């Protein structure tokens, strides 16, 4: 039985997120979009959020009472939708472990967790982490990463390039995926923690995006980058068999429902903007068919938003119940960005010419939403995953 009941504390967290979103996330997201620049890490808002314990809605360590039910995935989904409703770009710009958290928490040794979580306990300034898998020549095909890792005494030498890595220019450390032997495919994958300032971590630069401008997407080069052997995530023992690649995939399955529901947050924002516009412009002297079309479009948006949200909740519930959720997480990730694209497009239609004017919020949402179908596994790739699992089609 699926339960949506996750305790009073979640309700209070949601209320705080709503207030934060209304006061800061949306205004700052709009400001970044107008300036066409990410919000800089030294912006006072980040310190304020950090000191109030508000970070990115994913990658959070489970504060669970002994024996109590796991609720982290569902709390993540709840908060991710709310923050994305206010501004998806700003919700990723918030300080915290982000996508770097799940691999550290699930694969890291106790010593690694102690060391790399330590900066995140410092409340005097905000801290970020990042996750670097994608390369200029390997995105969907993660097995094809080319960044090499060669053992040299008590260190590993990394060489390669990573692209579109969220928050990597401001990150305390980046989980960098590399291969010890390309011919081994996924079995050759290893994850390393590369700290900011490590010699050989070079050429960090922004990528300019059409939407989600508030957070930075950056590329970088690893040139003879020497990483201590102790920074191999999980230690040597972790990589027996296919555990390395499985570690990356497991961390994606845990975060995918929260990423999928962010599209629902954007869709809900588009729905609200279109509904408010329709209400404002509803006049009895206008011909009825026009309002019928508004109504039909709004009802279609509301219906699909609800279906998408339920898919995310089911995938998150399975994660909390520690049951396999690969198919459900892929269904949510394949479905939600598509319906969010439809919702933002319908919102623009409802507003008519005003819909493409930059002073109307739906124009920004229309640009923000596209990347949701690309990040963390594109829609096409999710459909391949589902096909493989459901009908046994080969990868
Ligand atoms: C805003 C943003 C933030 C990101 N943040 C991060 C991050 O923090 N860390 C990180 O590591 N990466 C990040 N990425 C990268 C993201 O994970 C990749 O862009 C994504 O995996 C797709 O890879 P690609 O861009 O190389 O496209 P490709 O893999 O080259 O795909 C191009 C197109 O071909 C399709 N395609 C590919 N293979 C197949 C196939 N077998 N069958 C059918 N269709 C196929 C894809 O669906 C896509 O439409 C981010 C990307 C964006 C846009």
Image (cartoon, helix red, strand yellow):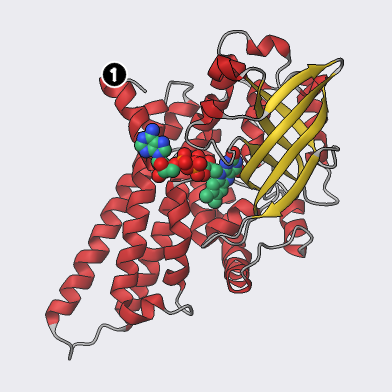
Residue 255 position within the rendered picture, expressed as x and y whole percent measured from the top left: 53, 36
Residue name at image x 82 percent, y 48 percent = 123
- Nearest to the observer: residue 5 or residue 377: 377
Q: Quadrant of residue 296?
A: bottom left
- Residue 368 vs 119, above or below: the answer is below
- The C terminus is located in which quarter? top left
The crowding category of the residue bearing disc 1, from other C-alpha atoms within 10 Å (few below 14, some 14 to 19, many at least 20), is: few
- Horizontal arrangement in the rendering, residue 250 relative to residue 112 (left or right): left
- Residue 232 vs 348, above or below: the answer is above
Is ligand 1 closer than 8 angstroms to the Cβ of mark 1? no
- Horizontal arrangement in the rendering, residue 126 relative to residue 337 (left or right): right
Residue name at image x 66 percent, y 36 percent = 100
Q: Secondary structure at mark 1?
A: loop
- Residue 373 vs 114, above or below: the answer is below
Residue 283 position within the rendered picture, expressed as x and y whole percent measured from the top left: 23, 87
> How many marks do you count on the picture?
1
Please, which residue is most extreme toward the bottom here? 285
Q: Is residue 7 shown to the viewer in this render? A: no
Residue 332 position within the rendered picture, expressed as x and y whole percent measured from the top left: 38, 39
- The N terminus is located in which quarter? top left
Q: Is residue 277 shown to the viewer in this render? A: yes
Residue 147 position within the rendered picture, expressed as x and y whole percent measured from the top left: 66, 30
- Horizontal arrangement in the rendering, residue 256 relative to residue 300 (left or right): right
**What residue is shown with label 1?**
392
Residue name at image x 43 percent, y 21 percent = 324
- Residue 159 vs 293, above or below: the answer is above
């Amino acid at each position: 039985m699926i339960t949506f009941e996750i305790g009073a504390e979640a309700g209070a967290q949601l209320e705080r997120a709503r207030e934060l979103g209304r006061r800061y996330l949306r205004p700052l997201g709009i400001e970044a979009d107008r300036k066409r620049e990410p919000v800089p890490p030294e912006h006072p808002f980040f310190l304020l959020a950090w000191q109030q314990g508000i970070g990115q809605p994913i990658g959070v360590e489970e504060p669970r009472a002994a024996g109590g039910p796991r609720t982290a995935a569902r709390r993540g989904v709840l908060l991710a939708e709310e923050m994305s409703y206010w501004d998806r770009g700003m919700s990723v710009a918030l300080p915290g472990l982000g996508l770097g958290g799940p691999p550290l928490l699930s694969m890291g040794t106790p010593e690694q967790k102690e060391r790399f979580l330590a900066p995140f306990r410092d409340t005097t300034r905000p801290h970020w982490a990042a996750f670097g898998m994608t390369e200029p020549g390997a995105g969907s095909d993660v097995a094809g990463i080319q960044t090499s890792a060669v053992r040299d005494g008590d260190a590993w030498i990394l060489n390669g390039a990573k692209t579109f890595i969220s928050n990597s220019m401001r990150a305390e450390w980046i989980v960098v995926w590399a291969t010890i032997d390309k011919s081994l495919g996924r079995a050759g994958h290893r994850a390393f923690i590369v700290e900011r300032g490590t010699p050989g971590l070079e050429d960090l630069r922004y990528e300019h995006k059409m939407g989600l401008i508030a957070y930075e997407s950056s590329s970088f080069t690893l040139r003879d980058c020497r990483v201590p052997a102790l920074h191999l995530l999980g230690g040597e023992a972790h990589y027996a068999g296919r555990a390395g690649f499985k570690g990356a995939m497991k961390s994606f399955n845990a975060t995918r429902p929260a990423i999928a529901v962010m599209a629902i947050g954007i869709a809900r924002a588009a729905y609200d903007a279109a509904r408010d516009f329709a209400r404002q412009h509803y006049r009895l002297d206008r011909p009825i068919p026009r309002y019928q079309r508004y109504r039909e479009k709004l009802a279609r948006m509301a219906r699909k938003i609800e279906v998408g949200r339920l898919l995310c909740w089911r995938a998150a519930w399975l994660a909390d119940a520690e049951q396999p959720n690969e198919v459900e997480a892929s269904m949510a990730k394949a479905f939600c960005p598509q319906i969010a694209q439809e919702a933002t497009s319908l919102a623009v239609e409802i507003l008519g010419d005003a819909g493409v004017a930059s002073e109307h919020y739906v124009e920004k949402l229309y640009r923000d939403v596209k990347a949701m179908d690309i990040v963390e596994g594109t829609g096409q790739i999710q459909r391949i995953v589902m096909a493989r699992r459901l009908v046994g089609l080969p990868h």
